[in-house]
Amino acid sequence: MSNEPATVEALDDVPTGRRLALDVHAAVRAMILSGELEPGAPILQAALARRLGVSRTPMREAFRLLQEEGLIDNKPDQRAIVREIDPGEIDTVYTSRVMLEAVAVSISVRAATPELVSRLEDGLARMRALAGEDDIEHWQQAHREFHQLTTEGVPALHDTICSLGERAERFLRLAQLGNPGASSRWDAEHETLVQAFRLRDHDLAVRTIAQHLARTAFTAMADIAPHQDATATRAALNLLLTPPAGSFH
């Protein structure tokens, strides 16, 4: 790979501000995912800013986004370090999420109350408002709370599901920032999930949550390891979409 990223010329033509920070983030992100910046390697804001021909301000915002994604460790008064990315962890986490959340949603949707549906509708509205404001951090919190609502009817699985959700947030950010078009698809799936709870439509709810979670895993995997498939996640999805007769009834 060339020592000069392909995005340098493009950066010179973009106005300063949020858009420039996002373009800088994309350029550094590409260096990390391509292996040009290797796991464990220190990365200096000043050196990268000079290389890309930008000021330190957009570089600081880019580093913040990279840390949110889990691509770097960036602690105060220390050099930022490129983190190791394990594609196998994506498959492990999302296989567990697909199976456990499908079970929890299967139970919760049958007992969905108008009050729960109203809370889900409010959660969806909040995510949409935050997405419009480009408030990634608070959107992620709202997204986490929305998914917890869909499984709160199963306290026995609550702690495990929440722990898996926290581990998955790093991969959600990878899929979100690496594939901007994914957000509209997720929004449609969230809306379908609300509709399934409104109608107490068990099959629709289980199918939607399984596809929704698996799609995120596939998107993140395609971004960071395009030649590797999320095999276990795909098997879990296929199992849920083609269950033996009577499995969920």
Image (cartoon, grey):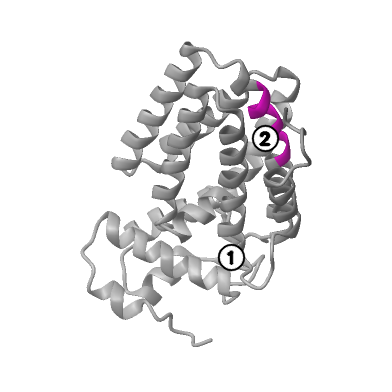
Q: CA distance from mark 2 to mark 1?
A: 23 Å
Q: Nearer the viewer, residue 202 or 50?
A: 202
Left or right for 245, reference 205: right
Q: Secondary structure at mark 1?
A: helix
Image: magenta residue range: 99-107
Give percent across and percent down for residue 232: 76, 54
Q: Nearer the viewer, residue 207 or 161?
A: 207
Q: Tell me the residue at 63%/28% (across/down).
A: 105
Q: Residue furthest front?
A: 245
Of marks 2 and 1, the one in the foreground: 2
Q: Quadrant of residue 56?
A: bottom left
Give percent across and percent down for residue 25: 42, 62
Q: Which mark is residue 102?
A: 2
Q: Which mark is residue 222?
A: 1
Q: Nearer the viewer, residue 198 or 24?
A: 198
Q: Quadrant of residue 218?
A: bottom right
